[in-house]
Amino acid sequence: MTLSFPRPRLLIAVLLLATVLRADDGMWLLTNPPLQDLKAKYGFEPTPAWLEHVQKASVRMNNGGSGSFASADGLVITNHHVASDAIYKLSSTGHNYLEDGYHAKSRAEELKCTDLELNVLMSIEDVTARVNAAVKPDLAPAEANVARRSIMAEIEKESLEQSGLRSDVVTLYQGGQYHLYRYKRYTDVRLVWAPEQQAAFFGGDPDNFEFPRYNLDVTLFRVYENDAPVKVEHYLKWNPAGTTAGELVFITGHPGSTQRLITMAELEYARDIQVPNVMRYLKNREVLLLSYSARSEENARRAKDEVFTIANSRKVYDGRISGLLDPVLIAAKEAEEAALKTFAADHPELGATDAWDKITAAQLVIARQALRHNLLEAYAFNSDLFGKARSLLRAATERALPNGERLREFRDSARTEFELALFSEEPVYEDFEILKIKNYLEYIAMELGAKDPVVQAALGGKAPAVRAAELVTGSKIHDLAFRKKLYAMSPEELAQVDDPMLALARAVDAEARAGRKVIEAQAEVKQQAHARIARVRYAKDGDKVSPDATFTLRLAYGTVKGLQQDGVDIPAYTDIAGTFVRATERNNVPPFNLPATWLAAKDRFKGDTPFNFIHTSYSIGGNSGSPTLNRNGEFVGILFDGNIHSLVWNYAYSDTVARSVSVDVRGILEAMRTVYGADELVAEILGTK
Amino acid sequence: MTLSFPRPRLLIAVLLLATVLRADDGMWLLTNPPLQDLKAKYGFEPTPAWLEHVQKASVRMNNGGSGSFASADGLVITNHHVASDAIYKLSSTGHNYLEDGYHAKSRAEELKCTDLELNVLMSIEDVTARVNAAVKPDLAPAEANVARRSIMAEIEKESLEQSGLRSDVVTLYQGGQYHLYRYKRYTDVRLVWAPEQQAAFFGGDPDNFEFPRYNLDVTLFRVYENDAPVKVEHYLKWNPAGTTAGELVFITGHPGSTQRLITMAELEYARDIQVPNVMRYLKNREVLLLSYSARSEENARRAKDEVFTIANSRKVYDGRISGLLDPVLIAAKEAEEAALKTFAADHPELGATDAWDKITAAQLVIARQALRHNLLEAYAFNSDLFGKARSLLRAATERALPNGERLREFRDSARTEFELALFSEEPVYEDFEILKIKNYLEYIAMELGAKDPVVQAALGGKAPAVRAAELVTGSKIHDLAFRKKLYAMSPEELAQVDDPMLALARAVDAEARAGRKVIEAQAEVKQQAHARIARVRYAKDGDKVSPDATFTLRLAYGTVKGLQQDGVDIPAYTDIAGTFVRATERNNVPPFNLPATWLAAKDRFKGDTPFNFIHTSYSIGGNSGSPTLNRNGEFVGILFDGNIHSLVWNYAYSDTVARSVSVDVRGILEAMRTVYGADELVAEILGTK
């Protein structure tokens, strides 16, 4: 059954149980919005047409963010910090579009991005029954995992062939539901306009996750098909009047992941193993990048985007560990789990009494494997070249397998995306790559011990600096033609290729794969157990809780609302005049230096134009670039951040001091006109052309 | 026997075995300099008077650096980065002497430092026999450790009472020798002149451990006694003519520690446990400090000195891990150890055949305890307040014990130094302290697991942010009068004091002490085994190798010499004109911004004045501030750094690309006159007053 619009919801009877008004909690499927709450609290009932329109006007950026169509001619607005990776790849020593911004004065000047893919969600279909039917209850975890991967790949392939659309089976409620998502896919995306990074990211890392803020964190792309701008039916109208405090707002976007529904065992794993492992790695990289950046301005340019990404993640994990060590949060989770367990025990017919223990046992196995898995698989030697070498090595082997038995990234339906990344022509800087690999070799030696066989294999009997230089300067993987040649080879031909980076990928591949297999098998165990817990949850509470985020389209809502912090009242809006005040207060020293264009435009600005604002909508990483909408479905801003208190939203929602942060539509328009002379784009967006 | 001057050396017969000319290796005791090498290679024979003069003109800074007397009226020169902690503590929001520099125009304006102690080495006495006699061979390690600590404390106390001098028993050759060092102690040290930190540390962390360099890394103090400048017989004459390339130079200073003589088991422990543990902690702190600094200029001021210290240490450990993972270095160490073991096996009368196995076993026990020891003992919650609370708590208990049974820092002979630190009135910034403790609580939770009982005790059932705020704002430890009151209390009275920081110290003390006890007992085992290995080494090679550094006075030597790096010839000297070139090249952006005083003086400078220079003298952390001398024992510069290649000197000496870096005497004098108008100080130093 296709869960598109307008269909009655199956769980209406259960929903009636949940009549107590709740906080503005939840990241809802657009096929299952919290209609009763919206009606009761805000007197608002989104129509099926409203829901379909905002769904199809919303865009997923394949590098991990969100966006929305802004004109019938395929203009897309997203955050500058979502776009910056693409802008970086378009830059070089001669053209620094991150630093200087970019403005295509005509369509001919719109710059094609090297590897950016955009997706628009066209439909959702519930395939839970079909997936579950294929995974026989008597299968061992590893076999069950293959069976599940296999049926998911089959469904995806079938759907791709039938519809021509990107087709992903999405796991919701940790395995409680499976939905088939079909996306329209766009791979010709061109840069239209971007402000200077200094305007987009004014205040830099110090102000990141803080409020008040003054950021023009926006970029415009245009989507092309067949070398012409795409014509879209669903795009968001911008309302230049913006919002007022207390107003109901929505965000539609692609929250990456939350961990609301995990068990206590999983929470403890996050607290004691996962977050510590990741934090060590992030801090190691942050120190490396900052010290590399400090050596020269060219280094700083090369590393800037990565510095931002890493510092940003580090803050996210800082927020998470604060939450995980908060006894109030833990007590609430414990109470919730205890209640679910009691309900499960009272209802043995739900077959979930041992589900928590299964998860605990699986989590222990994962915990033992986690560090090696991160180091040998997930982090990929912190090297683009290594990542590409490994992709080539595995592609040869995996393609020979039936679609369903392959590692997930090699399934047929993911081929376009895979090849886009493999054949991306982003620049590789030899010295930077050598430094990163040297650091990584030292890092794995310190994490696993220098005598660990896989560390010895990685070092190849050489000092890290010597080995890193040999891997980078001796390899031809950076060469696109070479990669294309290798991609066409059989495993036997590839085995004859003598390239040090490929050899490194080969040397660690057996262990990397074995570790991944263990983790995926245990994930399967957990998934089956979670599916049973999901049944308990439904039976007990209905769908009072939305599924955890899965980098798929969700609707959240809240009100524009200030907060009290350290005894101070912070209003919901900042204005453009405040930007200049903040820059002066910090002596215009980076990252509080405004670009020259802004300084020149200072007197022309309408200073009281609202610039950034906060609201209580539930968001998380991946929501960056989410359009912020009013009840008419009009664009009134673009989400670009959450404040520091919102970081705990990964584990629990609260709206006392946690806020989402958006750029106000009025600030965007004012800056486009006043600073950037982008009147033709404003006219296109407002339809006044 | 007092090993002062001029005494015949006992090992002369053995020394004759070592006639092959060696590199300029070694950190030599001034009582046992490499006379034959100096004579053979450089035709230079330091006289006993030469040695005594440079010894008594050299100064140890109790915060971990070196210096030298520069005038008969007690002027002392050291590095700015050695002095910066003291300068920081003299600064406040209104007076930023780190940023602005300081110049006392009269003696009345010389500023008394809060807690700086200077020591001058007066004599060395070999007490090996007495120490070893007190440690009966049949004692268990913990008892042997107490016996050793006891005899050392007894010797020190006896010496203090007899001589009135600070008396330390120093362990050389990992337990091969024990020497009693007697120091003249100075605790009234006043700031006379310091340049701006930006001149001292131009290029900041990015240029740290690099060459070419352009740093005026110097500060002048004056030592007082009874409120008057001290009159010293031994001070170094400055030679304004400096040095020339190829010239023989010496450094006298206090290298902190090296690990040249450790066994392979200890080396592997360093590589797999110790360095990784320390690196994680350093990177965690560096990220914390940088992100705190970025929030405001006042934060940056508060954290600046600590940022430098941490980034500096991190680079040191970076260099170490590079060395530890270098198979060439490891192979050399393995060969050396194999040869020693063979010699030991061939000479069973030396009784050392099982010494290596003893060390390996002890190291395994230490390895299991190391992390907890660091976290509960060494790092002291990264909080000055916690450190002081713990000092107070332990002082009450330890004072009740016999001198020899106390923890080493509580022995009678260390009391002055201990009280200086405890009663230091350095400023405490509440928000900064809270942030550090919050971070530390999260850090130990991540390192040890949140459920670890000691972590639970530290958190006290609260979230880290809440707990940290309560510990800092609820404690009165910051108040000097309160500390003095507590210091006067008996353990029973102290137990009644209700202060959260004291309570935290109490809560973790049992485990912290127990862990320390394990480590000290195993260190004793290692020490006994090392003493046996030292006998093998002597019998085989004589004293071809100098003892590892122990933060005691050493003499090293080398020649002024450029190097080839990445195919480029780097001359031995930079000049002042180069400073302005480097600033321009980096657009005067921090940390490459010159202070206003320098920019104003640009045209007055003699641009070709030598500024910094490199030489092959063997140095390590602790040598900072070491006078660099010519063969007449005249001051020709001051050591302030080693290049990146020198960091491996911790484990092995090499002079192909590793260099020490000094500020040239000519650059110092030129800047003092041209920029700072410090003519009266120059006149005092040059004796032209």
Image (cartoon, coloured by chain):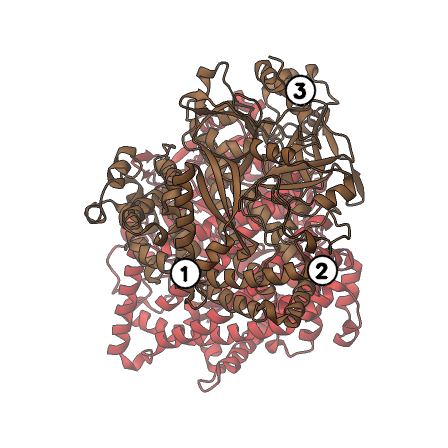
Chain colours: A red, B brown
Amino acid of disc 1: Leu
Horizontal arrangement in the rendering, residue A632 relative to residue A112 (left or right): left
Q: CA distance from mark 2 to mark 3?
A: 44 Å
Q: CA distance from mark 3 to mark 1?
A: 54 Å
Mark 3 in CB contact with mark 1 (< 8 angstroms): no
Q: Quadrant of residue A352?
A: bottom left
- The chain ID associated with circle 1 is B
Up-down relation of residue B547 to residue A519 (above or below): above
Q: Which mark is residue B233?
A: none
Which residue is at a point 39% across and 32% down the rendered structure image?
A: B426
User: How far from the left and from the top, in percent, is residue B38?
Assistant: 73, 42
Amino acid of disc 3: Glu
Q: Which mark is residue B448?
A: 1
Which secondary structure, mark 2?
Answer: helix
Are the residues flagged by discs 2 and 3 from a single subunit?
Answer: yes
Which residue is at a point 50% across and 32% down the rendered structure image?
A: B84
Q: Which mark is residue B670?
A: 3
- Classify the position of the C terminus of chain A by image quarter: top right
